[in-house]
Image (cartoon, rainbow, N blue to C red):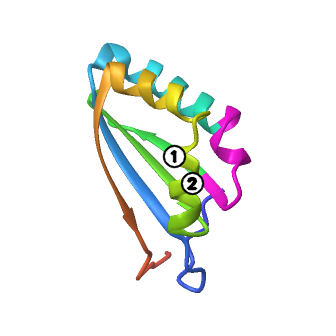
């Protein structure tokens, strides 16, 4: 589960994919498989959350890691590569790492 707390110095990956509407659900499945089979088993993994765009053309992967180093080791690991290749076959993406600075609940 996501940890949205400024007292925790976590790193967040926000990866926004653009996909054909017919492939949106397949991309969600691929991201879920990658998380369950590989990513969640790496040291430093905190959470992964996948959101889908209402128009069918976007998928957002919001993943949290204990540090940038943990994230980098995970994505560079050979076990992760086949999953990334499958995602790239049906979508393009823009990703960046972030740190939380502000949150407000209601």
Q: How crowded is mark 1: few (under 14 residues within 10 Å), some or many (20 or more)?
A: some
How far from the left and from the top, in percent, is residue 85? 42, 25
Tell me the residue that label 1 is attached to.
75
Which residue lies at the image location 67% right of the left edge and 62% below the top edge? 44
Does residue 65 sit above or below 36 in this rendering?
Answer: below
Of the pair 93 and 3, the residue shown nearer to us: 93
Q: Can residue 101 be seen in this view?
A: yes
Magenta stretch bounds:
36-47
Using the numbered discs, state the Cα–Cα distance from disc 1 to disc 2 in whole angstroms: 6 Å
View extreme (bottom): residue: 7
Q: Which mark is residue 34?
A: none
Residue 49 visible in rendering: no
Q: In front: 53, or 101?
A: 101
**Image side of residue 81 versus residue 95, left or right:** right
Q: Is residue 66 left or right of residue 25?
A: right
Residue appearing at x 44%, y 42% in the figure:
51
Quadrant of residue 33 in the image? Answer: top right
Vertical arrangement, residue 67 with respect to residue 76, above or below = below
Task: Give the quadrant of the N terminus.
Answer: bottom right
Q: Do the residues labelled 1 and 2 touch (CB within 8 Å)?
A: yes
99 is within the stretch colored magenta: no
The local secondary structure at tag 2 comes to helix
Q: Which residue in the protein does label 2 denote? A: 73
């Amino acid at each position: 589960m996501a940890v949205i707390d400024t007292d925790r110095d976590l790193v967040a990956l926000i990866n926004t994919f653009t996909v054909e509407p017919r492939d949106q659900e397949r991309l969600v499945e691929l991201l879920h498989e990658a998380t369950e089979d590989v990513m969640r088993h790496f040291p430093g993994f905190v959470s992964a959350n996948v959101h889908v765009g209402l128009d069918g053309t976007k998928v957002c992967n919001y993943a949290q890691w204990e540090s940038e180093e943990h994230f980098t080791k995970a994505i560079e690991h050979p076990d992760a590569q086949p999953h990334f290749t499958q995602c790239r076959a049906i979508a393009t993406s823009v990703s960046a790492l972030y740190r939380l600075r502000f949150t407000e609940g209601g």
